[in-house]
Image (spheres, rainbow, N blue to C red):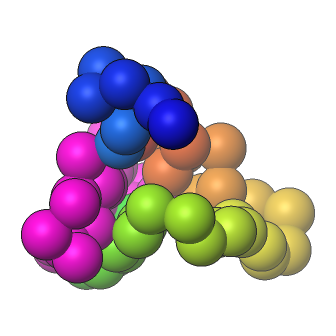
Amino acid sequence: MTSTQDTPRGDDGGPIVELRGTGKSYGNVRALHGVDLKVFPSQVTCVLGDNGAGKSTLIKIIS
């Protein structure tokens, strides 16, 4: 049995993290554009892509 503090938000079935239309630019370079992401409790979520695809930028935005 876990306490309420240990239980992640989203008990209603909704996501615990949600991004809509997220983007990031460095000057004229667009690193991310229009990213939508939902992370649900008890699911494994992976960020995968080629070098330079914006994975680290996305993780920095989330954190």
Picture coordinates of residue 58 (x, y %)?
49, 51
Describe residue 56's horizontal placement relative to residue 60 as left or right: right
Q: Is residue 47 above or below residue 5?
A: below
Instruction: Identify the residue shown where x is 24% and y is 46%.
Output: 9
- Whether 10 is among the magenta residues is yes
Q: From the viewer's side, name the closer residue of 35 and 24.
A: 35
Q: Is residue 35 above or below residue 8?
A: below
User: From the image, which quarter does the C terminus lie in?
Assistant: top left
Picture coordinates of residue 18 (x, y %)?
24, 63
Instruction: Identify the residue shown where x is 51% and y is 36%.
Output: 1
Instruction: Identify the residue shown where x is 75% and y is 60%.
Output: 52
Q: Is residue 63 above or below residue 40?
A: above
Describe residue 35's horizontal placement relative to residue 31 as left or right: left
Q: From the viewer's side, name the closer residue of 7 and 35.
A: 7
Name which quarter of the figure residue 8 lies in.
top left
Name which quarter of the figure residue 27 lies in.
top left
Q: From the viewer's side, name the closer residue of 24 and 38.
A: 38
Q: Is residue 34 above or below residue 26?
A: below
Picture coordinates of residue 32 (x, y %)?
41, 64
Describe residue 63's horizontal placement relative to residue 50 as left or right: left
Magenta residues, start to end: 9-31
